[in-house]
Amino acid sequence: MAKQKAESNTDKPASFMYDAIIIGSGPGGEGAAMNLSKSHKRVAVIERHKAVGGGCVHWGTIPSKALRHSVSRLIEYKQNPLFSLTEKPQRLTFGDILSHASNVISKQSNLRSSFYDRNRIELFQGDASFIDRYSIKVTHADGSYEVITAPIIVIATGSRPYRPPGVDFSHPRIYDSDTILSLEHDPQRVLIYGAGVIGCEYASIFKGLGAKVDLINTRDRLLAFMDAEISDALSYHFWNSGIVIRHNEEFAKVEPHEHGVILHLQSGKRVRADCILFANGRTGNTDKLNLAAVGLKADGRGQLKVNECYQTEIDNIYAVGDVIGYPSLASAAFDQGRIAAKAIVSGGCSEKLINDIPAGIYTIPEMSSVGKTEQELTAAKIPYEVGRAQFKHLARAQITGTQVGSLKLLFHSETKEILGVHCFGERASEIVHIGQAIMEQKGPGNNIEYFVNTTFNYPTMAEAYRVAALNGLNRLSD
């Protein structure tokens, strides 16, 4: 990417207040700030909200996963025969389980705040906007402002839910994935528009709480980026639990009422519910940064283009996290911030984000994958074989009562190199990392026979790797 000098109303100052300014304290901003500080740089971080952590801690990853955990435990309790003779708890509401999420959010934010104190990073609360390529205006809640300067600026402002035009999100029955955390009434029927990761996760949560759920999918299958068998397993599980999935649908308009909404679809269907959650994409938080002052322009989704070092078109301005788009994962954003900080300090990119980033989807049950899918391997004409382990056959799963799910290993038919790991079931997001660790080994270290020749603790869910490996190797000998 060609670099240019931004036109501004000031030249480069003779001195700066800081060595780097980070805009945003989410995973990407934190990763950049901490690594720059540990390289003995004077760092300032600007956060528009009262507490650090960004959308990841306050509205996205942490709250939704905390909610999911509470609902999952409730489902396990209800299904456990050990408690069949005891009095069952009354139906919990969304508000009931929010207290646990709020507690986790507070702990996470306080912990992350301590990181800034420990590393002597100065925090500014307010809205950031560019004056020129070296100067940032920080506007506080009371209208006052101050200007801070640095030779390096890192944009880590994250993203927010996309709000389609013509939808009144101020209505008390219309929510996005941020405002859903303020839900106070107890909906009996929930409508979710958008069947991506967020939509599927909240469909699990509300169904687990006993609500009727309509899931509107704008595509022809759920989570098409996942291995087809895994996404089909989720579709079946949703169908079996009573979730109504409507594929290939687009909304025409939302008709809100005092006690509910009616969603009008372009197909002519009308779907009624107590409330609607829009979970159909996200937009980068760049619209209030005054990017024009430095010659930067975001795309239609508010995202910025960067090179492999996370530099924007302006060579002293970097961007990391959701604001640059794919993969839009908290885990990747931490690494992007770290890599960008090292590039800033060293002047080059000695490290890169790994190619095979694991996907973890916190539905009930969970889904997770890393590496190639069967569809990708088939299209590339790579000879592969499949090894499977059903959780219902594992002693640990039988003990814990989490027998729904399976592990699938894809490996090269000739070299036995592991090409993909796909898991559906409780703790899938943890289980997948065992396979990822072996996949990342170079040369003969990446071999499915590793799982046969390794002794696993028994009983554990990790034993699924041995079962799946034997299953796959037996196919080669048949």
Image (tube, rainbow, N blue to C red):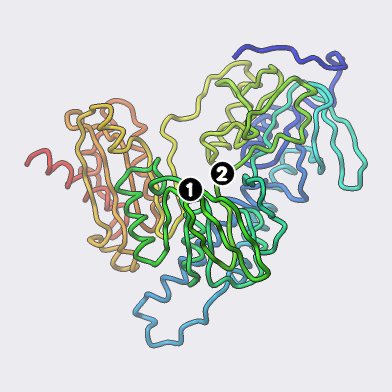
Question: In the image, 238: left or right of 193?
Answer: left
From the viewer's perspective, tell me whether residue 85 is left or right of residue 71.
Answer: left
Q: Residue at x 29, y 25 (%)?
A: 443
Quadrant placement of the C terminus: top left
At a point 80% along the width and 23% down the height, the residue shown is: 293
* Left or right: where 138 falls relative to 101: right
Q: Residue at x 27, y 46 (%)?
A: 408
Camera-nearest residue between 44 and 238: 238
Residue occupying the point 18% across, 32% down: 413
Dot 1 amino acid type: Gly
Q: Residues within 10 Å of mark 1 (few under 14, many from 20)?
A: many
Q: Position of residue 342 (x, y in %)?
A: 61, 24
Dot 1: element: loop
Mark 2 neighbour class, 10 Å CA radius: few under 14, some 14 to 19, many 20 or more: some
- Name the residue tied to disc 1: 196
- Can you identify the residue that label 2 sits on? 281
Left or right placement of residue 139 versus residue 420 in this view:
right
x and y, in percent, of residue 137 in the image: 85, 32
Nearer to me, 154 or 196: 196
Mark 2 residue element: loop
What number of labels is visible? 2
Q: Amino acid at mark 2?
A: Gly
Q: Are marks 2 and 1 in contact (CB under 8 Å)?
A: yes
